[in-house]
Image (tube, rainbow, N blue to C red):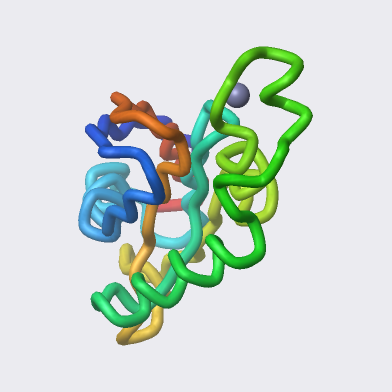
């Protein structure tokens, strides 16, 4: 059985990192499925999904490393093509990836104790984001 839901977020952009673990856990619980996998997907090329220990030090470290490997102020050809300012946002999204899949057993996500599901908004402005949450499993 497959159950598809949406998650709506308001983000600030500029590597805004939001903990969406409880919303994903709710989607699994409300599906009524006991065992399976849940996929969270961001339609859009400037968002990312991953897991991290959601504490200010780890979040600051992730932002700093992204600034180092994909700096916002490089000359991106994307800017020349579209007059855009978010070349780094697209590259970060491509590297982190636009989706995440987590197994669940007996209705519970199999996350580690210090592992949270996060959505990252790499765009250069606040956005309203719609994430697709698809729960696939059996009762
Ligand atoms: Zn762009």
80 vs 39, left or right, is right
55 vs 111, left or right, is left
Instruction: Name the residue: 30% across, 34% down.
Output: 7
- Where in the figure is residue 71, as x and y percent of width and height? 59, 54
Instruction: Name the residue: 67% across, 13% down.
Output: 82
134 vs 106, left or right, is right
- Where in the figure is residue 49, as x and y percent of width and height? 49, 52
Q: How many marks?
A: 0
Instruction: Name the residue: 35% across, 39% down.
Output: 13
- Viewer-proximal residue, 33 or 108? 108
- Where in the figure is residue 79, as x and y percent of width and height? 67, 24
- Viewer-proximal residue, 106 or 66? 66
Instruction: Name the residue: 25% across, 75% down.
Output: 56
- Viewer-proximal residue, 131 or 73? 73
- Where in the figure is residue 128, as x and y percent of width and height? 29, 24
Look at the picture and state if 29 lies above or below 64: above
Residue occupying the far top of the picture: 82
Look at the picture and state if 58 lies above or below 66: below
On the image, which quarter does residue 101 sit in?
bottom right
Q: Which quarter of the frame holds ligand 1?
A: top right
């Amino acid at each position: 059985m497959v159950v598809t839901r949406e998650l709506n977020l308001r983000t600030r952009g500029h590597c805004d990192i939001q903990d969406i673990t409880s919303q994903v856990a709710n989607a699994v619980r409300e599906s009524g499925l006991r065992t399976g996998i849940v996929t969270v997907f961001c339609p859009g090329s400037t968002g990312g999904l991953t897991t991290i220990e959601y504490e200010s030090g780890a979040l600051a470290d992730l932002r700093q490393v992204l600034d180092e490997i994909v700096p916002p102020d490089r000359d991106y050809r994307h800017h020349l093509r579209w007059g855009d300012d978010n070349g780094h946002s697209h590259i970060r999204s491509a590297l982190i990836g636009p989706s995440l899949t987590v197994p669940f057993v007996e209705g519970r996500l199999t996350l580690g104790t210090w592992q949270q599901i996060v959505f990252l908004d790499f765009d250069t402005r606040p956005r309203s984001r719609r994430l697709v949450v698809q729960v696939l499993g059996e009762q």
